[in-house]
Image (spheres, rainbow, N blue to C red):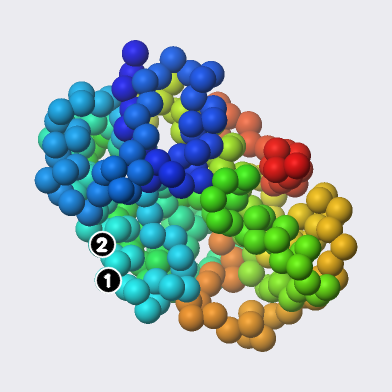
Amino acid sequence: MLKILVTGGKGQLAQCIEKLSSSYQFELVFRSSSELDITNAKKIEQELSNYNYDYCINCAAYTQVDKAESDAKKADIINHVAVENLAKSCAKSQVKLIHISTDFVFSGDNSIPYLEDDKTLALGVYGQTKLEGESKIIQNLDQFFIIRTSWLYSEFGNNFLKSMLKYGKEREELSVVFDQVGTPTYAMDLAEVILGIIQSQSKDYGVYHYSNEGVASWYDFAFNIFNLAGVNCKLKPIRSKDYPTPAKRPSFSVLDKSKIKSTFQIEIPNWQDSLSKAIQNIN
């Protein structure tokens, strides 16, 4: 039986993996940041050498995009330095690493979906630290899967879906930007793909893109949330320049999923279908 370490064990993606785990013959060990501090190189090395893991799924990350601008040191330690520690320890203990990255490694200047080897250029601290983490994995480890995803949400943790449901009930009107375009991704769908990659025991290591299918703006996402959940809150579409945030975000970050689909023979659900499922699970 394959033994798998899941770091960031209390986050939304880890909780989705845990929810699906009974369908797989794996021994999964979930470690929260308080149980395993991935910024501590010695602790990581001990964990990997003592427990004989086959895989590590790194769900630990600093994901507060705006806060990262004023808390760059902490974001860098978690998204870059800790990931380097993890990659080196995985190499030493011959553990395969599955690492989750982001569409925010791109500038948003494209008009067609981003391929894995397209030029990266992060606009903010969050994207930059995630990009540096990626490069440290590539430098230090051969057996890795880096999966870039986008606009992750689920019934667990803090995310756009949960925020919209909360604010939609509290307020009469909400303003949401319509000129940032990407794809919402249900963390349950991503979790299933990750577990499927492990089950296949594939050696097609490298960088992959995964999001749900389709394209949306944040306004589209919010509109569909309210529509599916029956929330009576007026939505006002606004431009990004009318809603300035500390971190600049890519205006276009749709990911091309051709590589992950052809390599692992998977079909990806449309974002609206998955959103409907997520809302049913919340209700």
* SS state under label 1: helix
Could you say where residue 50 lies in the image, as x and y percent from the top left?
15, 28
Between residue 123 and residue 245, name the one nearer to us. 245
Q: What residue is shown at x 78% (from left), y 63% (from top)?
A: 169
Of residue 17 and residue 181, the one placed in the foreground of this image is 17
Residue annotated with mark 1: 73
Q: Is residue 256 above or below residue 106?
A: above
Q: Is residue 8 visible?
A: yes
Q: Could you tell me residue 183's position as x and y percent?
A: 63, 54
What amino acid does circle 1 point to?
A: Lys
Query: The N terminus lies in which quarter of the figure?
Result: top left
Helix, strand or loop at label 2? It is helix
Q: Which residue is at the front of the view, 119 or 95?
A: 95
For residue 116, side relative to residue 206 (left or right): right
In the rendered view, tell whether residue 232 sits above or below residue 148.
below
10 Å neighbourhood of mark 1: few (<14), some, or many (≥20)? few
Give me the residue at 87% from left, 63% from top.
232
Q: Please tell me in which quadrant of the rendered image residue 71 appears.
A: bottom left
Q: x%, y% of residue 276?
A: 76, 43
- The foreground one among 185 and 9 is 9
Q: Residue 99: x and y, percent?
A: 36, 44
Q: Are marks 2 and 1 in contact (CB under 8 Å)?
A: yes
Around disc 2, counting alpha carbons within 10 Å, would you say few (fewer than 14), some (14 to 19), or many (20 or more)? some
**Disc 2 marks which amino acid?**
Ile
In the figure, is residue 95 to the left or right of 101? Answer: left
Give the label on residue 77, or none: 2
Residue 258 falls left or right of residue 178 = left
